[in-house]
Amino acid sequence: MVYKDFTKRELSEILGIIQAALACKSEQDVITVTGKIMNLVSADMGVCALGEIDSGRLLKVANHNWPAEWAMMYTAEELYKRDPVFLFNYEHFKSFEWKDATERFSERPNRDIMNRASEFRIKYGISSGICGGGPKGSIFSFASDRNRFSSHHLKILDILTPHIHQALLKTLDTQTKSDISLSNREKEVLCWMREGKTNWEISMILNISERTVKFHVQNIERKLNAVNKAHAIAIAMDSGLVV
Amino acid sequence: MPFDDLAKNELISILELIEISQKCKSPESVKSLILASKDVLEADFAVCGFASAGPQPMVTDFVNGNYPDEWVRRYTEERLCLHDPVVRFHSRYMLTQFWSDVFSFYDYPQANALIKDASDFGLKFGITGAVYAPERDEVAIFTFASDRNRFRRHHKRLLDILITHFYRALNESFSAIPRVEEGNRGKEILSLTRI
């Protein structure tokens, strides 16, 4: 890596982020670090995620300020299966500008996702990721509604990606039962899941859309590191989250 | 900014060393890392390793950067670590410290003899950092030495920044080497024979 191309201020900030990543103990710590990277690469939004490479299933998401509504739709509709950025990342595992991903995956379904994202000001961006040598891979995305990104920002991501990947892995490994924090709504959904209710039935009981229930279920599965609903209920009962 | 006190070339050196440390997968690569670190720390000699924690520390694994071979041989054969003020201090205190500040805590004949013998090999002044290695329940120790007193607070600061990265590199390098699981009897025998 050629560091002399960076200003002293950038080098100082890069080192600060590396040290902060080293000290990360929780998801919140990773979110804070993500925010620092976001500022350094001149982005408006930032998110980090760790997932299974084969299935694409997200195991951990550290969302700094990615639009919540978009994140909800993205997970509930499993948009990562057609998202050019996500697919390109898992194909290459290197820093890239989104335009490279949209060129590589230019079919209609892929383009549709980019168009839908742009409604949330997610128009331009850079991403990077690491395949940890095992079943887990990471993706770090930084976006804006303006095209501010250059190869300089990609170099910054190249430097920081291994560190933020390690930080994310550590928070996944150190997640203990006491760390599992479900929102009140997620707990409500979980309780009805335990009663054997379907997503549709839960949506009727809680007076919310079935899609929103699906989103909550996926979040619960991700937070509990469960492979399906039954597994999530078992973990939740074992953890005392539902009795 | 928390690193404003560092010069641009120092920041570059630190980031380069961190990058090297991430690629370390063997003791040989750790050797290259600590030798590359000598320049930024203005040291002439470098060594690192793991030691058991407690009042009678034993060096369990080490990587010799460029400590004089004869001194290393004597040190291991005569189990000098038992009277080495630096190892004894850092097996209890996981921090970065100048040797000159450590020596005063161990003012007894064997320790004084070791300090004198080491200085005959050019190991007169030094700076050492230590961190706890939970994977091994030991201490990881990184030492940089010189025959001249060049070490200042600034070097301490640099080593403080680097040490966790160095520790991860050292741990990664030795975790790739299978360790023999010792039974109680084995531990007894090893405690008697380990050099």
Image (cartoon, helix red, strand yellow):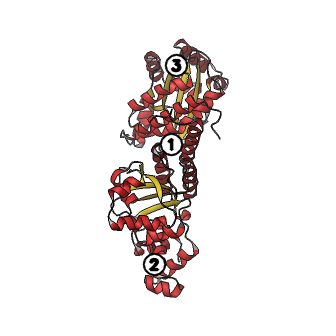
Q: CA distance from mark 3 to mark 1?
A: 30 Å
Give the residue displayed 56% in from the left and 76% down from the top.
Answer: A185
Pointer 1 chain:
B
The answer to whether residue B176 is left or right of residue A184 is: left
- For marks 3 and 1, the one nearer the N-term is 3
**Dot 1 lies on which element?**
loop
| Residue B44, label in figure | 3
Label 2 – label 1 distance at C-alpha = 49 Å
- Which of the 4 image quadrants contains residue B7? top right
**Which residue is the site of mark 2?**
A211
Give the residue type that dot 1 points to: Asp
Where is residue B64 drawn, in percent x and y?
Answer: 44, 25
In front: label 2 or label 1: 2
Q: Position of residue A234 (x, y in %)?
A: 44, 73
Label 3: state its secondary structure.
Answer: loop
Residue type for callout 3: Asp
Q: Which mark is residue A180?
A: none
From the viewer's side, name the closer residue of A79 and B91. Answer: A79
**Chain at tag 2:** A
Look at the picture and state if A1 lies above or below A153. above
Q: Residues within 10 Å of mark 1 (few under 14, many from 20)?
A: few
In the picture, measured across the screen, residue B15 lies left or right of residue A90, that is right
Nearer the viewer's eye, disc 3 or disc 1? Answer: 3
Q: Give me the C-alpha separation between circle 2 and circle 3.
A: 65 Å
What is the three-letter code of the residue carrying label 2?
A: Arg
Mark nearer the viewer, 2 or 3: 2
How many C-alpha atoms fall within 10 Å of the one at disc 3: few (<14), some, or many (≥20)?
Answer: some
Which one is in front, B141 or B15?
B15
Q: Which mark is residue B137?
A: 1
